[in-house]
Amino acid sequence: MSAAADPVGPPVGRFAPSPTGPLHAGSLVAALASWLDVRARGPRARWLVRIEDADTERCLPGMGAHILAQLAACGLVPDLPPLWQTQRHARYQQTLDGLIAAGLAYPCACSRKDIDEALAQRGVTHQRHGERVYPGTCRCGLRGRAARAWRFATEAFSTSADRPLQWHDRRLGEQRQDVAAEVGDFVLKRADGPWAYQLAVVVDDADQGVTDVVRGEDLADNTARQILLQRAFGFEQPRYLHTPLVRGEDGHKLSKQNGAASIDTATPAAALAALKAAAGVLGLPPTDAADIGSALAGWVPRWRDLYNPPP
Ligand code: GLU
């Protein structure tokens, strides 16, 4: 069981697309799921959209506004103005400074090659999603080298309660990960560049009062890292639900990186067809609703039956 108490306060859900490409069939599933999860909780609940443009190198100009227009064409309109991560640098810096002051973040000078060499010297060859566990080279200082990144002091922070860190997913069930052993001291910010997703997402979810994170299953693996950061900051832990992925004809998950096609929202009929496909992925029964509003309204009670959202 997860040790976390249920969040207090009105239910708040969010959809947090990165504007690196238009909405595709996979991202629409996450958007629809997070919207339904909020609407199934009654009138107090709020659905928010956050444009995750912190990693400015990968974002495309105008894409955030395009995604918002695609969502609106699907009847998915946030209850408050969207939050843009590019406007939050000062807040992220403040939280990083807090971690540094607490001895929980440190500068790191290692390049990828340095990390590979340090690990090879120790005979470590295994990789995790193409990444190696950081060997801790800079934990005790930069030794005159220039900082390339700030890392979270995972090992220093983790207590026996975090090893492994256990959390509950409303669809996937009990999950566990020993972040210190399996991921290591992860990056919070590149020295001259963007904020890392892990730091920005945790700070934003807390500041937006998010009680329920509903997002694609490909992101489930990040959750333990994010819970660890929540514990370091003293933030409340949201509930989690990771939705099924949409796979392309080659069996790989659809993603902007592999050029997934944009959903077609040019007409209400096309948007409704895209929504019906997304609802099917979520296991919702087929609907013969002829317009978007009645299709969405019809799925709300079905969502309740299937995913049992807490009050
Ligand atoms: N911005 C992330 C993405 O588009 C999602 C982040 C999240 O939902 O936590 O993949």
Image (cartoon, helix red, strand yellow):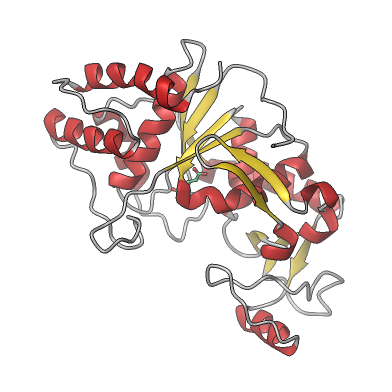
In the image, 253 versus 50, the foreground residue is 253
Residue at the image point whose x is 36% and y is 61% from the top: 257
Q: Is residue 80 visible?
A: no
Tell me residue 217's x, y (percent). Answer: 46, 47
Q: Is residue 267 left or right of residue 44?
A: left
Q: Position of residue 168 (x, y in %)?
A: 62, 38
* Image quarter in which the N terminus is found: top right
Say above or below: 308 vs 164.
above
For the C terminus, which image quadrant?
top right
Residue 301 appears in the picture as rendered:
yes
Percent across and percent down for residue 128 are 58, 69
Q: Residue at x 31, y 40 (%)?
A: 281
Residue drawn at (78%, 76%) of the image: 137
Choose top left, top right, bottom left or bottom right for residue 208.
Answer: top right
- What is the count of numbered marks? 0
243 left or right of 93?
Answer: left
Q: Residue furthest top?
A: 43
Looking at the image, residue 196 lies above or below residue 234: below
In the visual, does 293 lie left or right of 304? left
Q: Quadrant for residue 196, please give it.
A: bottom right
Q: Nearer the viewer, residue 199 or 309?
A: 309
